[in-house]
Amino acid sequence: MAYDYDLFVIGAGSGGVRASRLAAMAGAKVAVAEEDRAGGTCVIRGCIPKKYMVYASEFGRSLKHMEGYGWKVENATYDHNLFMDKMHREVDRLSGIYSRNVRNAGAEIIDDRAEFVDAHTLKLKKTGKTVTAGKILIATGGRPTMPKDVEGIEHAITSADMFHLKQLPKHILIVGGGYIGVEFAGIMSGLGVNVCLAIRKEAVLRGFDEDVRTHVHEELKRKGVKVITMANPTRIERIGDQLKTYFTNGETVAAEQVLFAIGREPNTKGLGLEKAGVKLNANGAVEVDEYSRTSVPHIFAVGDVTDRMNLTPVAIREGQAFAQTEFMNRPTAFDHAEVPHAVFAQPPAGVVGMSEAEARKAFGMVDIYKTKFRPMKDMLTGDEERVLMKIVVRAEDERVVGVHIVGPDAPEIIQAVAIAVKMGASKADFDRTCALHPSIAEELVTMREKYIPPELKPV
Ligand code: NDP
């Protein structure tokens, strides 16, 4: 049977755009439906505007640091609307580039929402038109999860709203100590907002190495963020221009804004996946195999909608692997191991590979190398911020299986270190690499002493 398209992609975010461009360049007839603007979470309401907000917020601290280097800065002010306006213009520019790149590759962009009618047919919501395709790629991403059991939750905002605040609140409560909660706590605090971060365990960033969690947690507090732990929100009440949030541990917090950042969920609602026979897993994500193939052989899914590793570059690589497999005759499964990732906290954390706990569980014996120090730059600024570096080594063959950095430029450093880790570098390879002086990263190749926990040290 002849279909309207060889490939129909739902969602013009990171994964969908990469897949559609490659498939179109390989000669396939491709269309991409997007109900919002091209670019997806990353460009429109995630990584890109978030990183600009991180940059904006860092200047506050830099102004203080400048004094340590002899600069006098008087009457410095921050204009939130001016910055936001410039940031959104850049977001618009990037979104335009995404659309253009898709079209230049020979694919069609349809500004509409597409929903399944059956396994080969999609209905476009605005026009009511139906289209058919030989293969379909679901790349609809995810959206912020909001709790169902918190009374007054309609008063709270999500990370997407943070990019459209008309003015900065004086006080914000952030619920959730994951990537988004920690990043916005740093941003808001850097911009001079009074921040309270509420988490339901003892430390932020569950899943990260314990030393990273402790370090980021302590740095947040040192920067003036009030962190309340073991706190589960139950109710938000509006009192005048304040929102009062009640927690199970008896605490209450009053703030002008309440941001909920308690995770994200796959965008599968209303897509008609049941009509196509596409199965979801227990978390509501599209179930796929290593080639991103769903339970229906000609329907595929990549990116956050599959809830594998919710990171932009991973979605891109999954989209690329799909296009290579299905349209370029090069079967490729993306390898999800040793993907570097970063939390743009202040200072940021950069990680590749396993935490100490994961490595101990997987290999039993591991060697740990770690150091904490004040970066050279701060010797003149008086800032007490510390850098953390930690290397996790598999004892049996000395292979480096994890590197963890919290400190200035950690994401930049970790991206380069990830090459060595992916190549299987050993601790001896790190040791025989000459240091680059003076730098923060040189500590990575100068750590010689294995870390022995105090309780195991001979007395
Ligand atoms: P995360 O999964 O990272 O963290 C969620 C946080 O919310 C955890 O602290 C969790 O606590 C807490 N939480 C979960 N449910 C509740 C609840 N009902 N009440 C109170 N607290 C709750 O989610 P985020 O929203 O921060 O980010 C979503 C995903 O987006 C990330 O996992 C990441 O994949 C991606 N992302 C990546 C970024 C990057 O690469 N730099 C930046 C931003 C997002 P607990 O630990 O106890 O479960």
Image (spheres, helix red, strand yellow):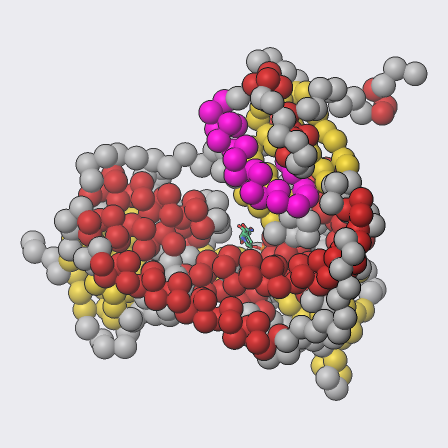
205 relative to 359, above or below: below
Q: Which residues are magenta?
A: 404-424
Task: State the predominant SS element of the stretch in magenta.
Answer: helix
Q: Going by the picture, which residue comes out furthest to the bottom?
A: 240
Which of 437/32 is in front? 437
Q: Is residue 135 left or right of residue 322?
A: left
- The residue that appears at 72% across and 81% down in the rendered structure is 238
User: Dividing the picture into quarters, in which one does residue 60 lie?
Assistant: bottom right
In the image, taking residue 231 as reference, residue 10 lies left or right, namely left
Residue 417 among those drawn in magenta: yes
Res. 263 image quadrant: bottom right
Considering every residue shown, the one lying at the far left of the view is 1
User: Could you tell me if residue 236 is visible in this image?
Assistant: no
Number of numbered discs overlaid on the protein picture: 0
Q: Taking 346 as reference, is 422 above or below it?
A: above
Q: Which residue occupies 71% across, 19% down? A: 448
Is residue 143 found inside the magenta-colored segment of the image? no
Residue 324 image position (x, y, % from top left): 25, 40
Residue at image location 20% in from the left, 52% down from the top: 24
Observer able to see residue 14: yes
